[in-house]
Image: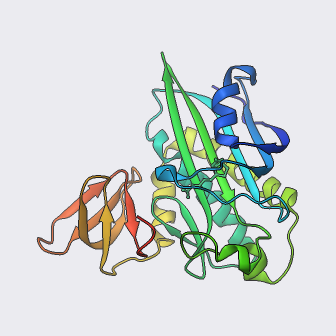
Amino acid sequence: MINLEIENVFLKEVDSTQTFVKKHAQEFNQNKITCVVADTQTSGYGRHQRKWLSPSSFENIYCSFYFVLPSSIKNFVNISELLSYSLIEFLIENGLKPEIKWPNDVLLSQKKLAGILCETSFQNETVQIFLGIGLNVNLPKKECSQVDQPATSLLIETEKKWQRDFVLEKVQKQFLKNLSLFLKEGFASFAAKIDHLLAHKNKSLTFYDGDKEYTGSIVSISSDGALNFKIEKTAEIKKFYSGTLITTKKNK
Ligand code: BTN
């Protein structure tokens, strides 16, 4: 099992920290967690290959964690939810009221503050985790309006500037604590906490599973991190492990 320590690698400019960690994985210490942090990305991307706006002058967080776990670990697909929960804890500690848009968008004032992307690769008995987070730290209003869905930043929400590395250090610390708990006890205790933070609960909306759209409402998160979604027409509760909640016209 890996040591729960993070080695940061700071870069000025990169195409994408996610692409970088996937390309250089073998060069990193396989017994620790590596976190590649960039000031700017020229081709940052998100879920469904959407572009992730990554300008340099605003001290946002663009980083990707790389680490290896035994593939026998249950529910490792929920590691992305652990990272969003770690950020949520930091935000609550600072007097903010975050929500989670399932599976792992972090919202403030119903707008997207951070997005998380988890990619995996299996090798024999192990799984390589490439876990990226984009967090709008000091992104001003004008730039937020260029994002393809309602977006916000810590600067907008708190009306003060934040030090990127301070925020990063706090979130990393929470993440290490949560990852350690997850590796010992699994995901169930996180599922219950995340359930309380879910945005758009019990409202009529559309869920897209990558193939089909369903109209219905969010019921809860199950103990393995899946979304329990009630189909409006039949009242059947369907369990989804991946997909997108469509809350604006642009965000499918
Ligand atoms: C999403 O909400 O769709 C996930 C966005 C993830 C963006 C981050 S920024 C750092 C890392 N590098 C990338 O190219 N993407 C992730």
| Residue sticking out furthest to the left | 234
Q: Residue at x 64, y 66 (%)?
A: 88
**Is 182 drawn above or below residue 114 in the view shown?**
above
Q: Quadrant of residue 53?
A: bottom right
Q: Quadrant of the C terminus?
A: bottom left
- The structure residue drawn at horizontal position 52% and vertical position 59%, both measured from the top left corner, is 104
154 or 48: nearer the viewer: 48
Q: How many marks?
A: 0
Residue depicted at x 75% and y 57%: 61
Q: Determine which quarter of the picture holds residue 204.
A: bottom left
Provide residue 58's location: percent of width, then percent of height.
83, 65
Give the residue furthest to the top. 124
* Residue drawn at point x = 56 percent, y = 76 percent: 150
27 shown above or below 7: above
Query: Where does the image place residue 238, in percent across and percent down from the top left?
Result: 23, 59
Nearer-the-camera pick, 217 or 64: 64
Q: Nearer the viewer, residue 248 or 146?
A: 146
Q: Position of residue 172 (x, y in %)?
A: 75, 50
> Foreground residue, 47 or 43?
43
Question: Which quadrant of the rendered structure holds the N terminus?
Answer: top right
**Whole-percent x, y for residue 246 in the image:** 38, 70
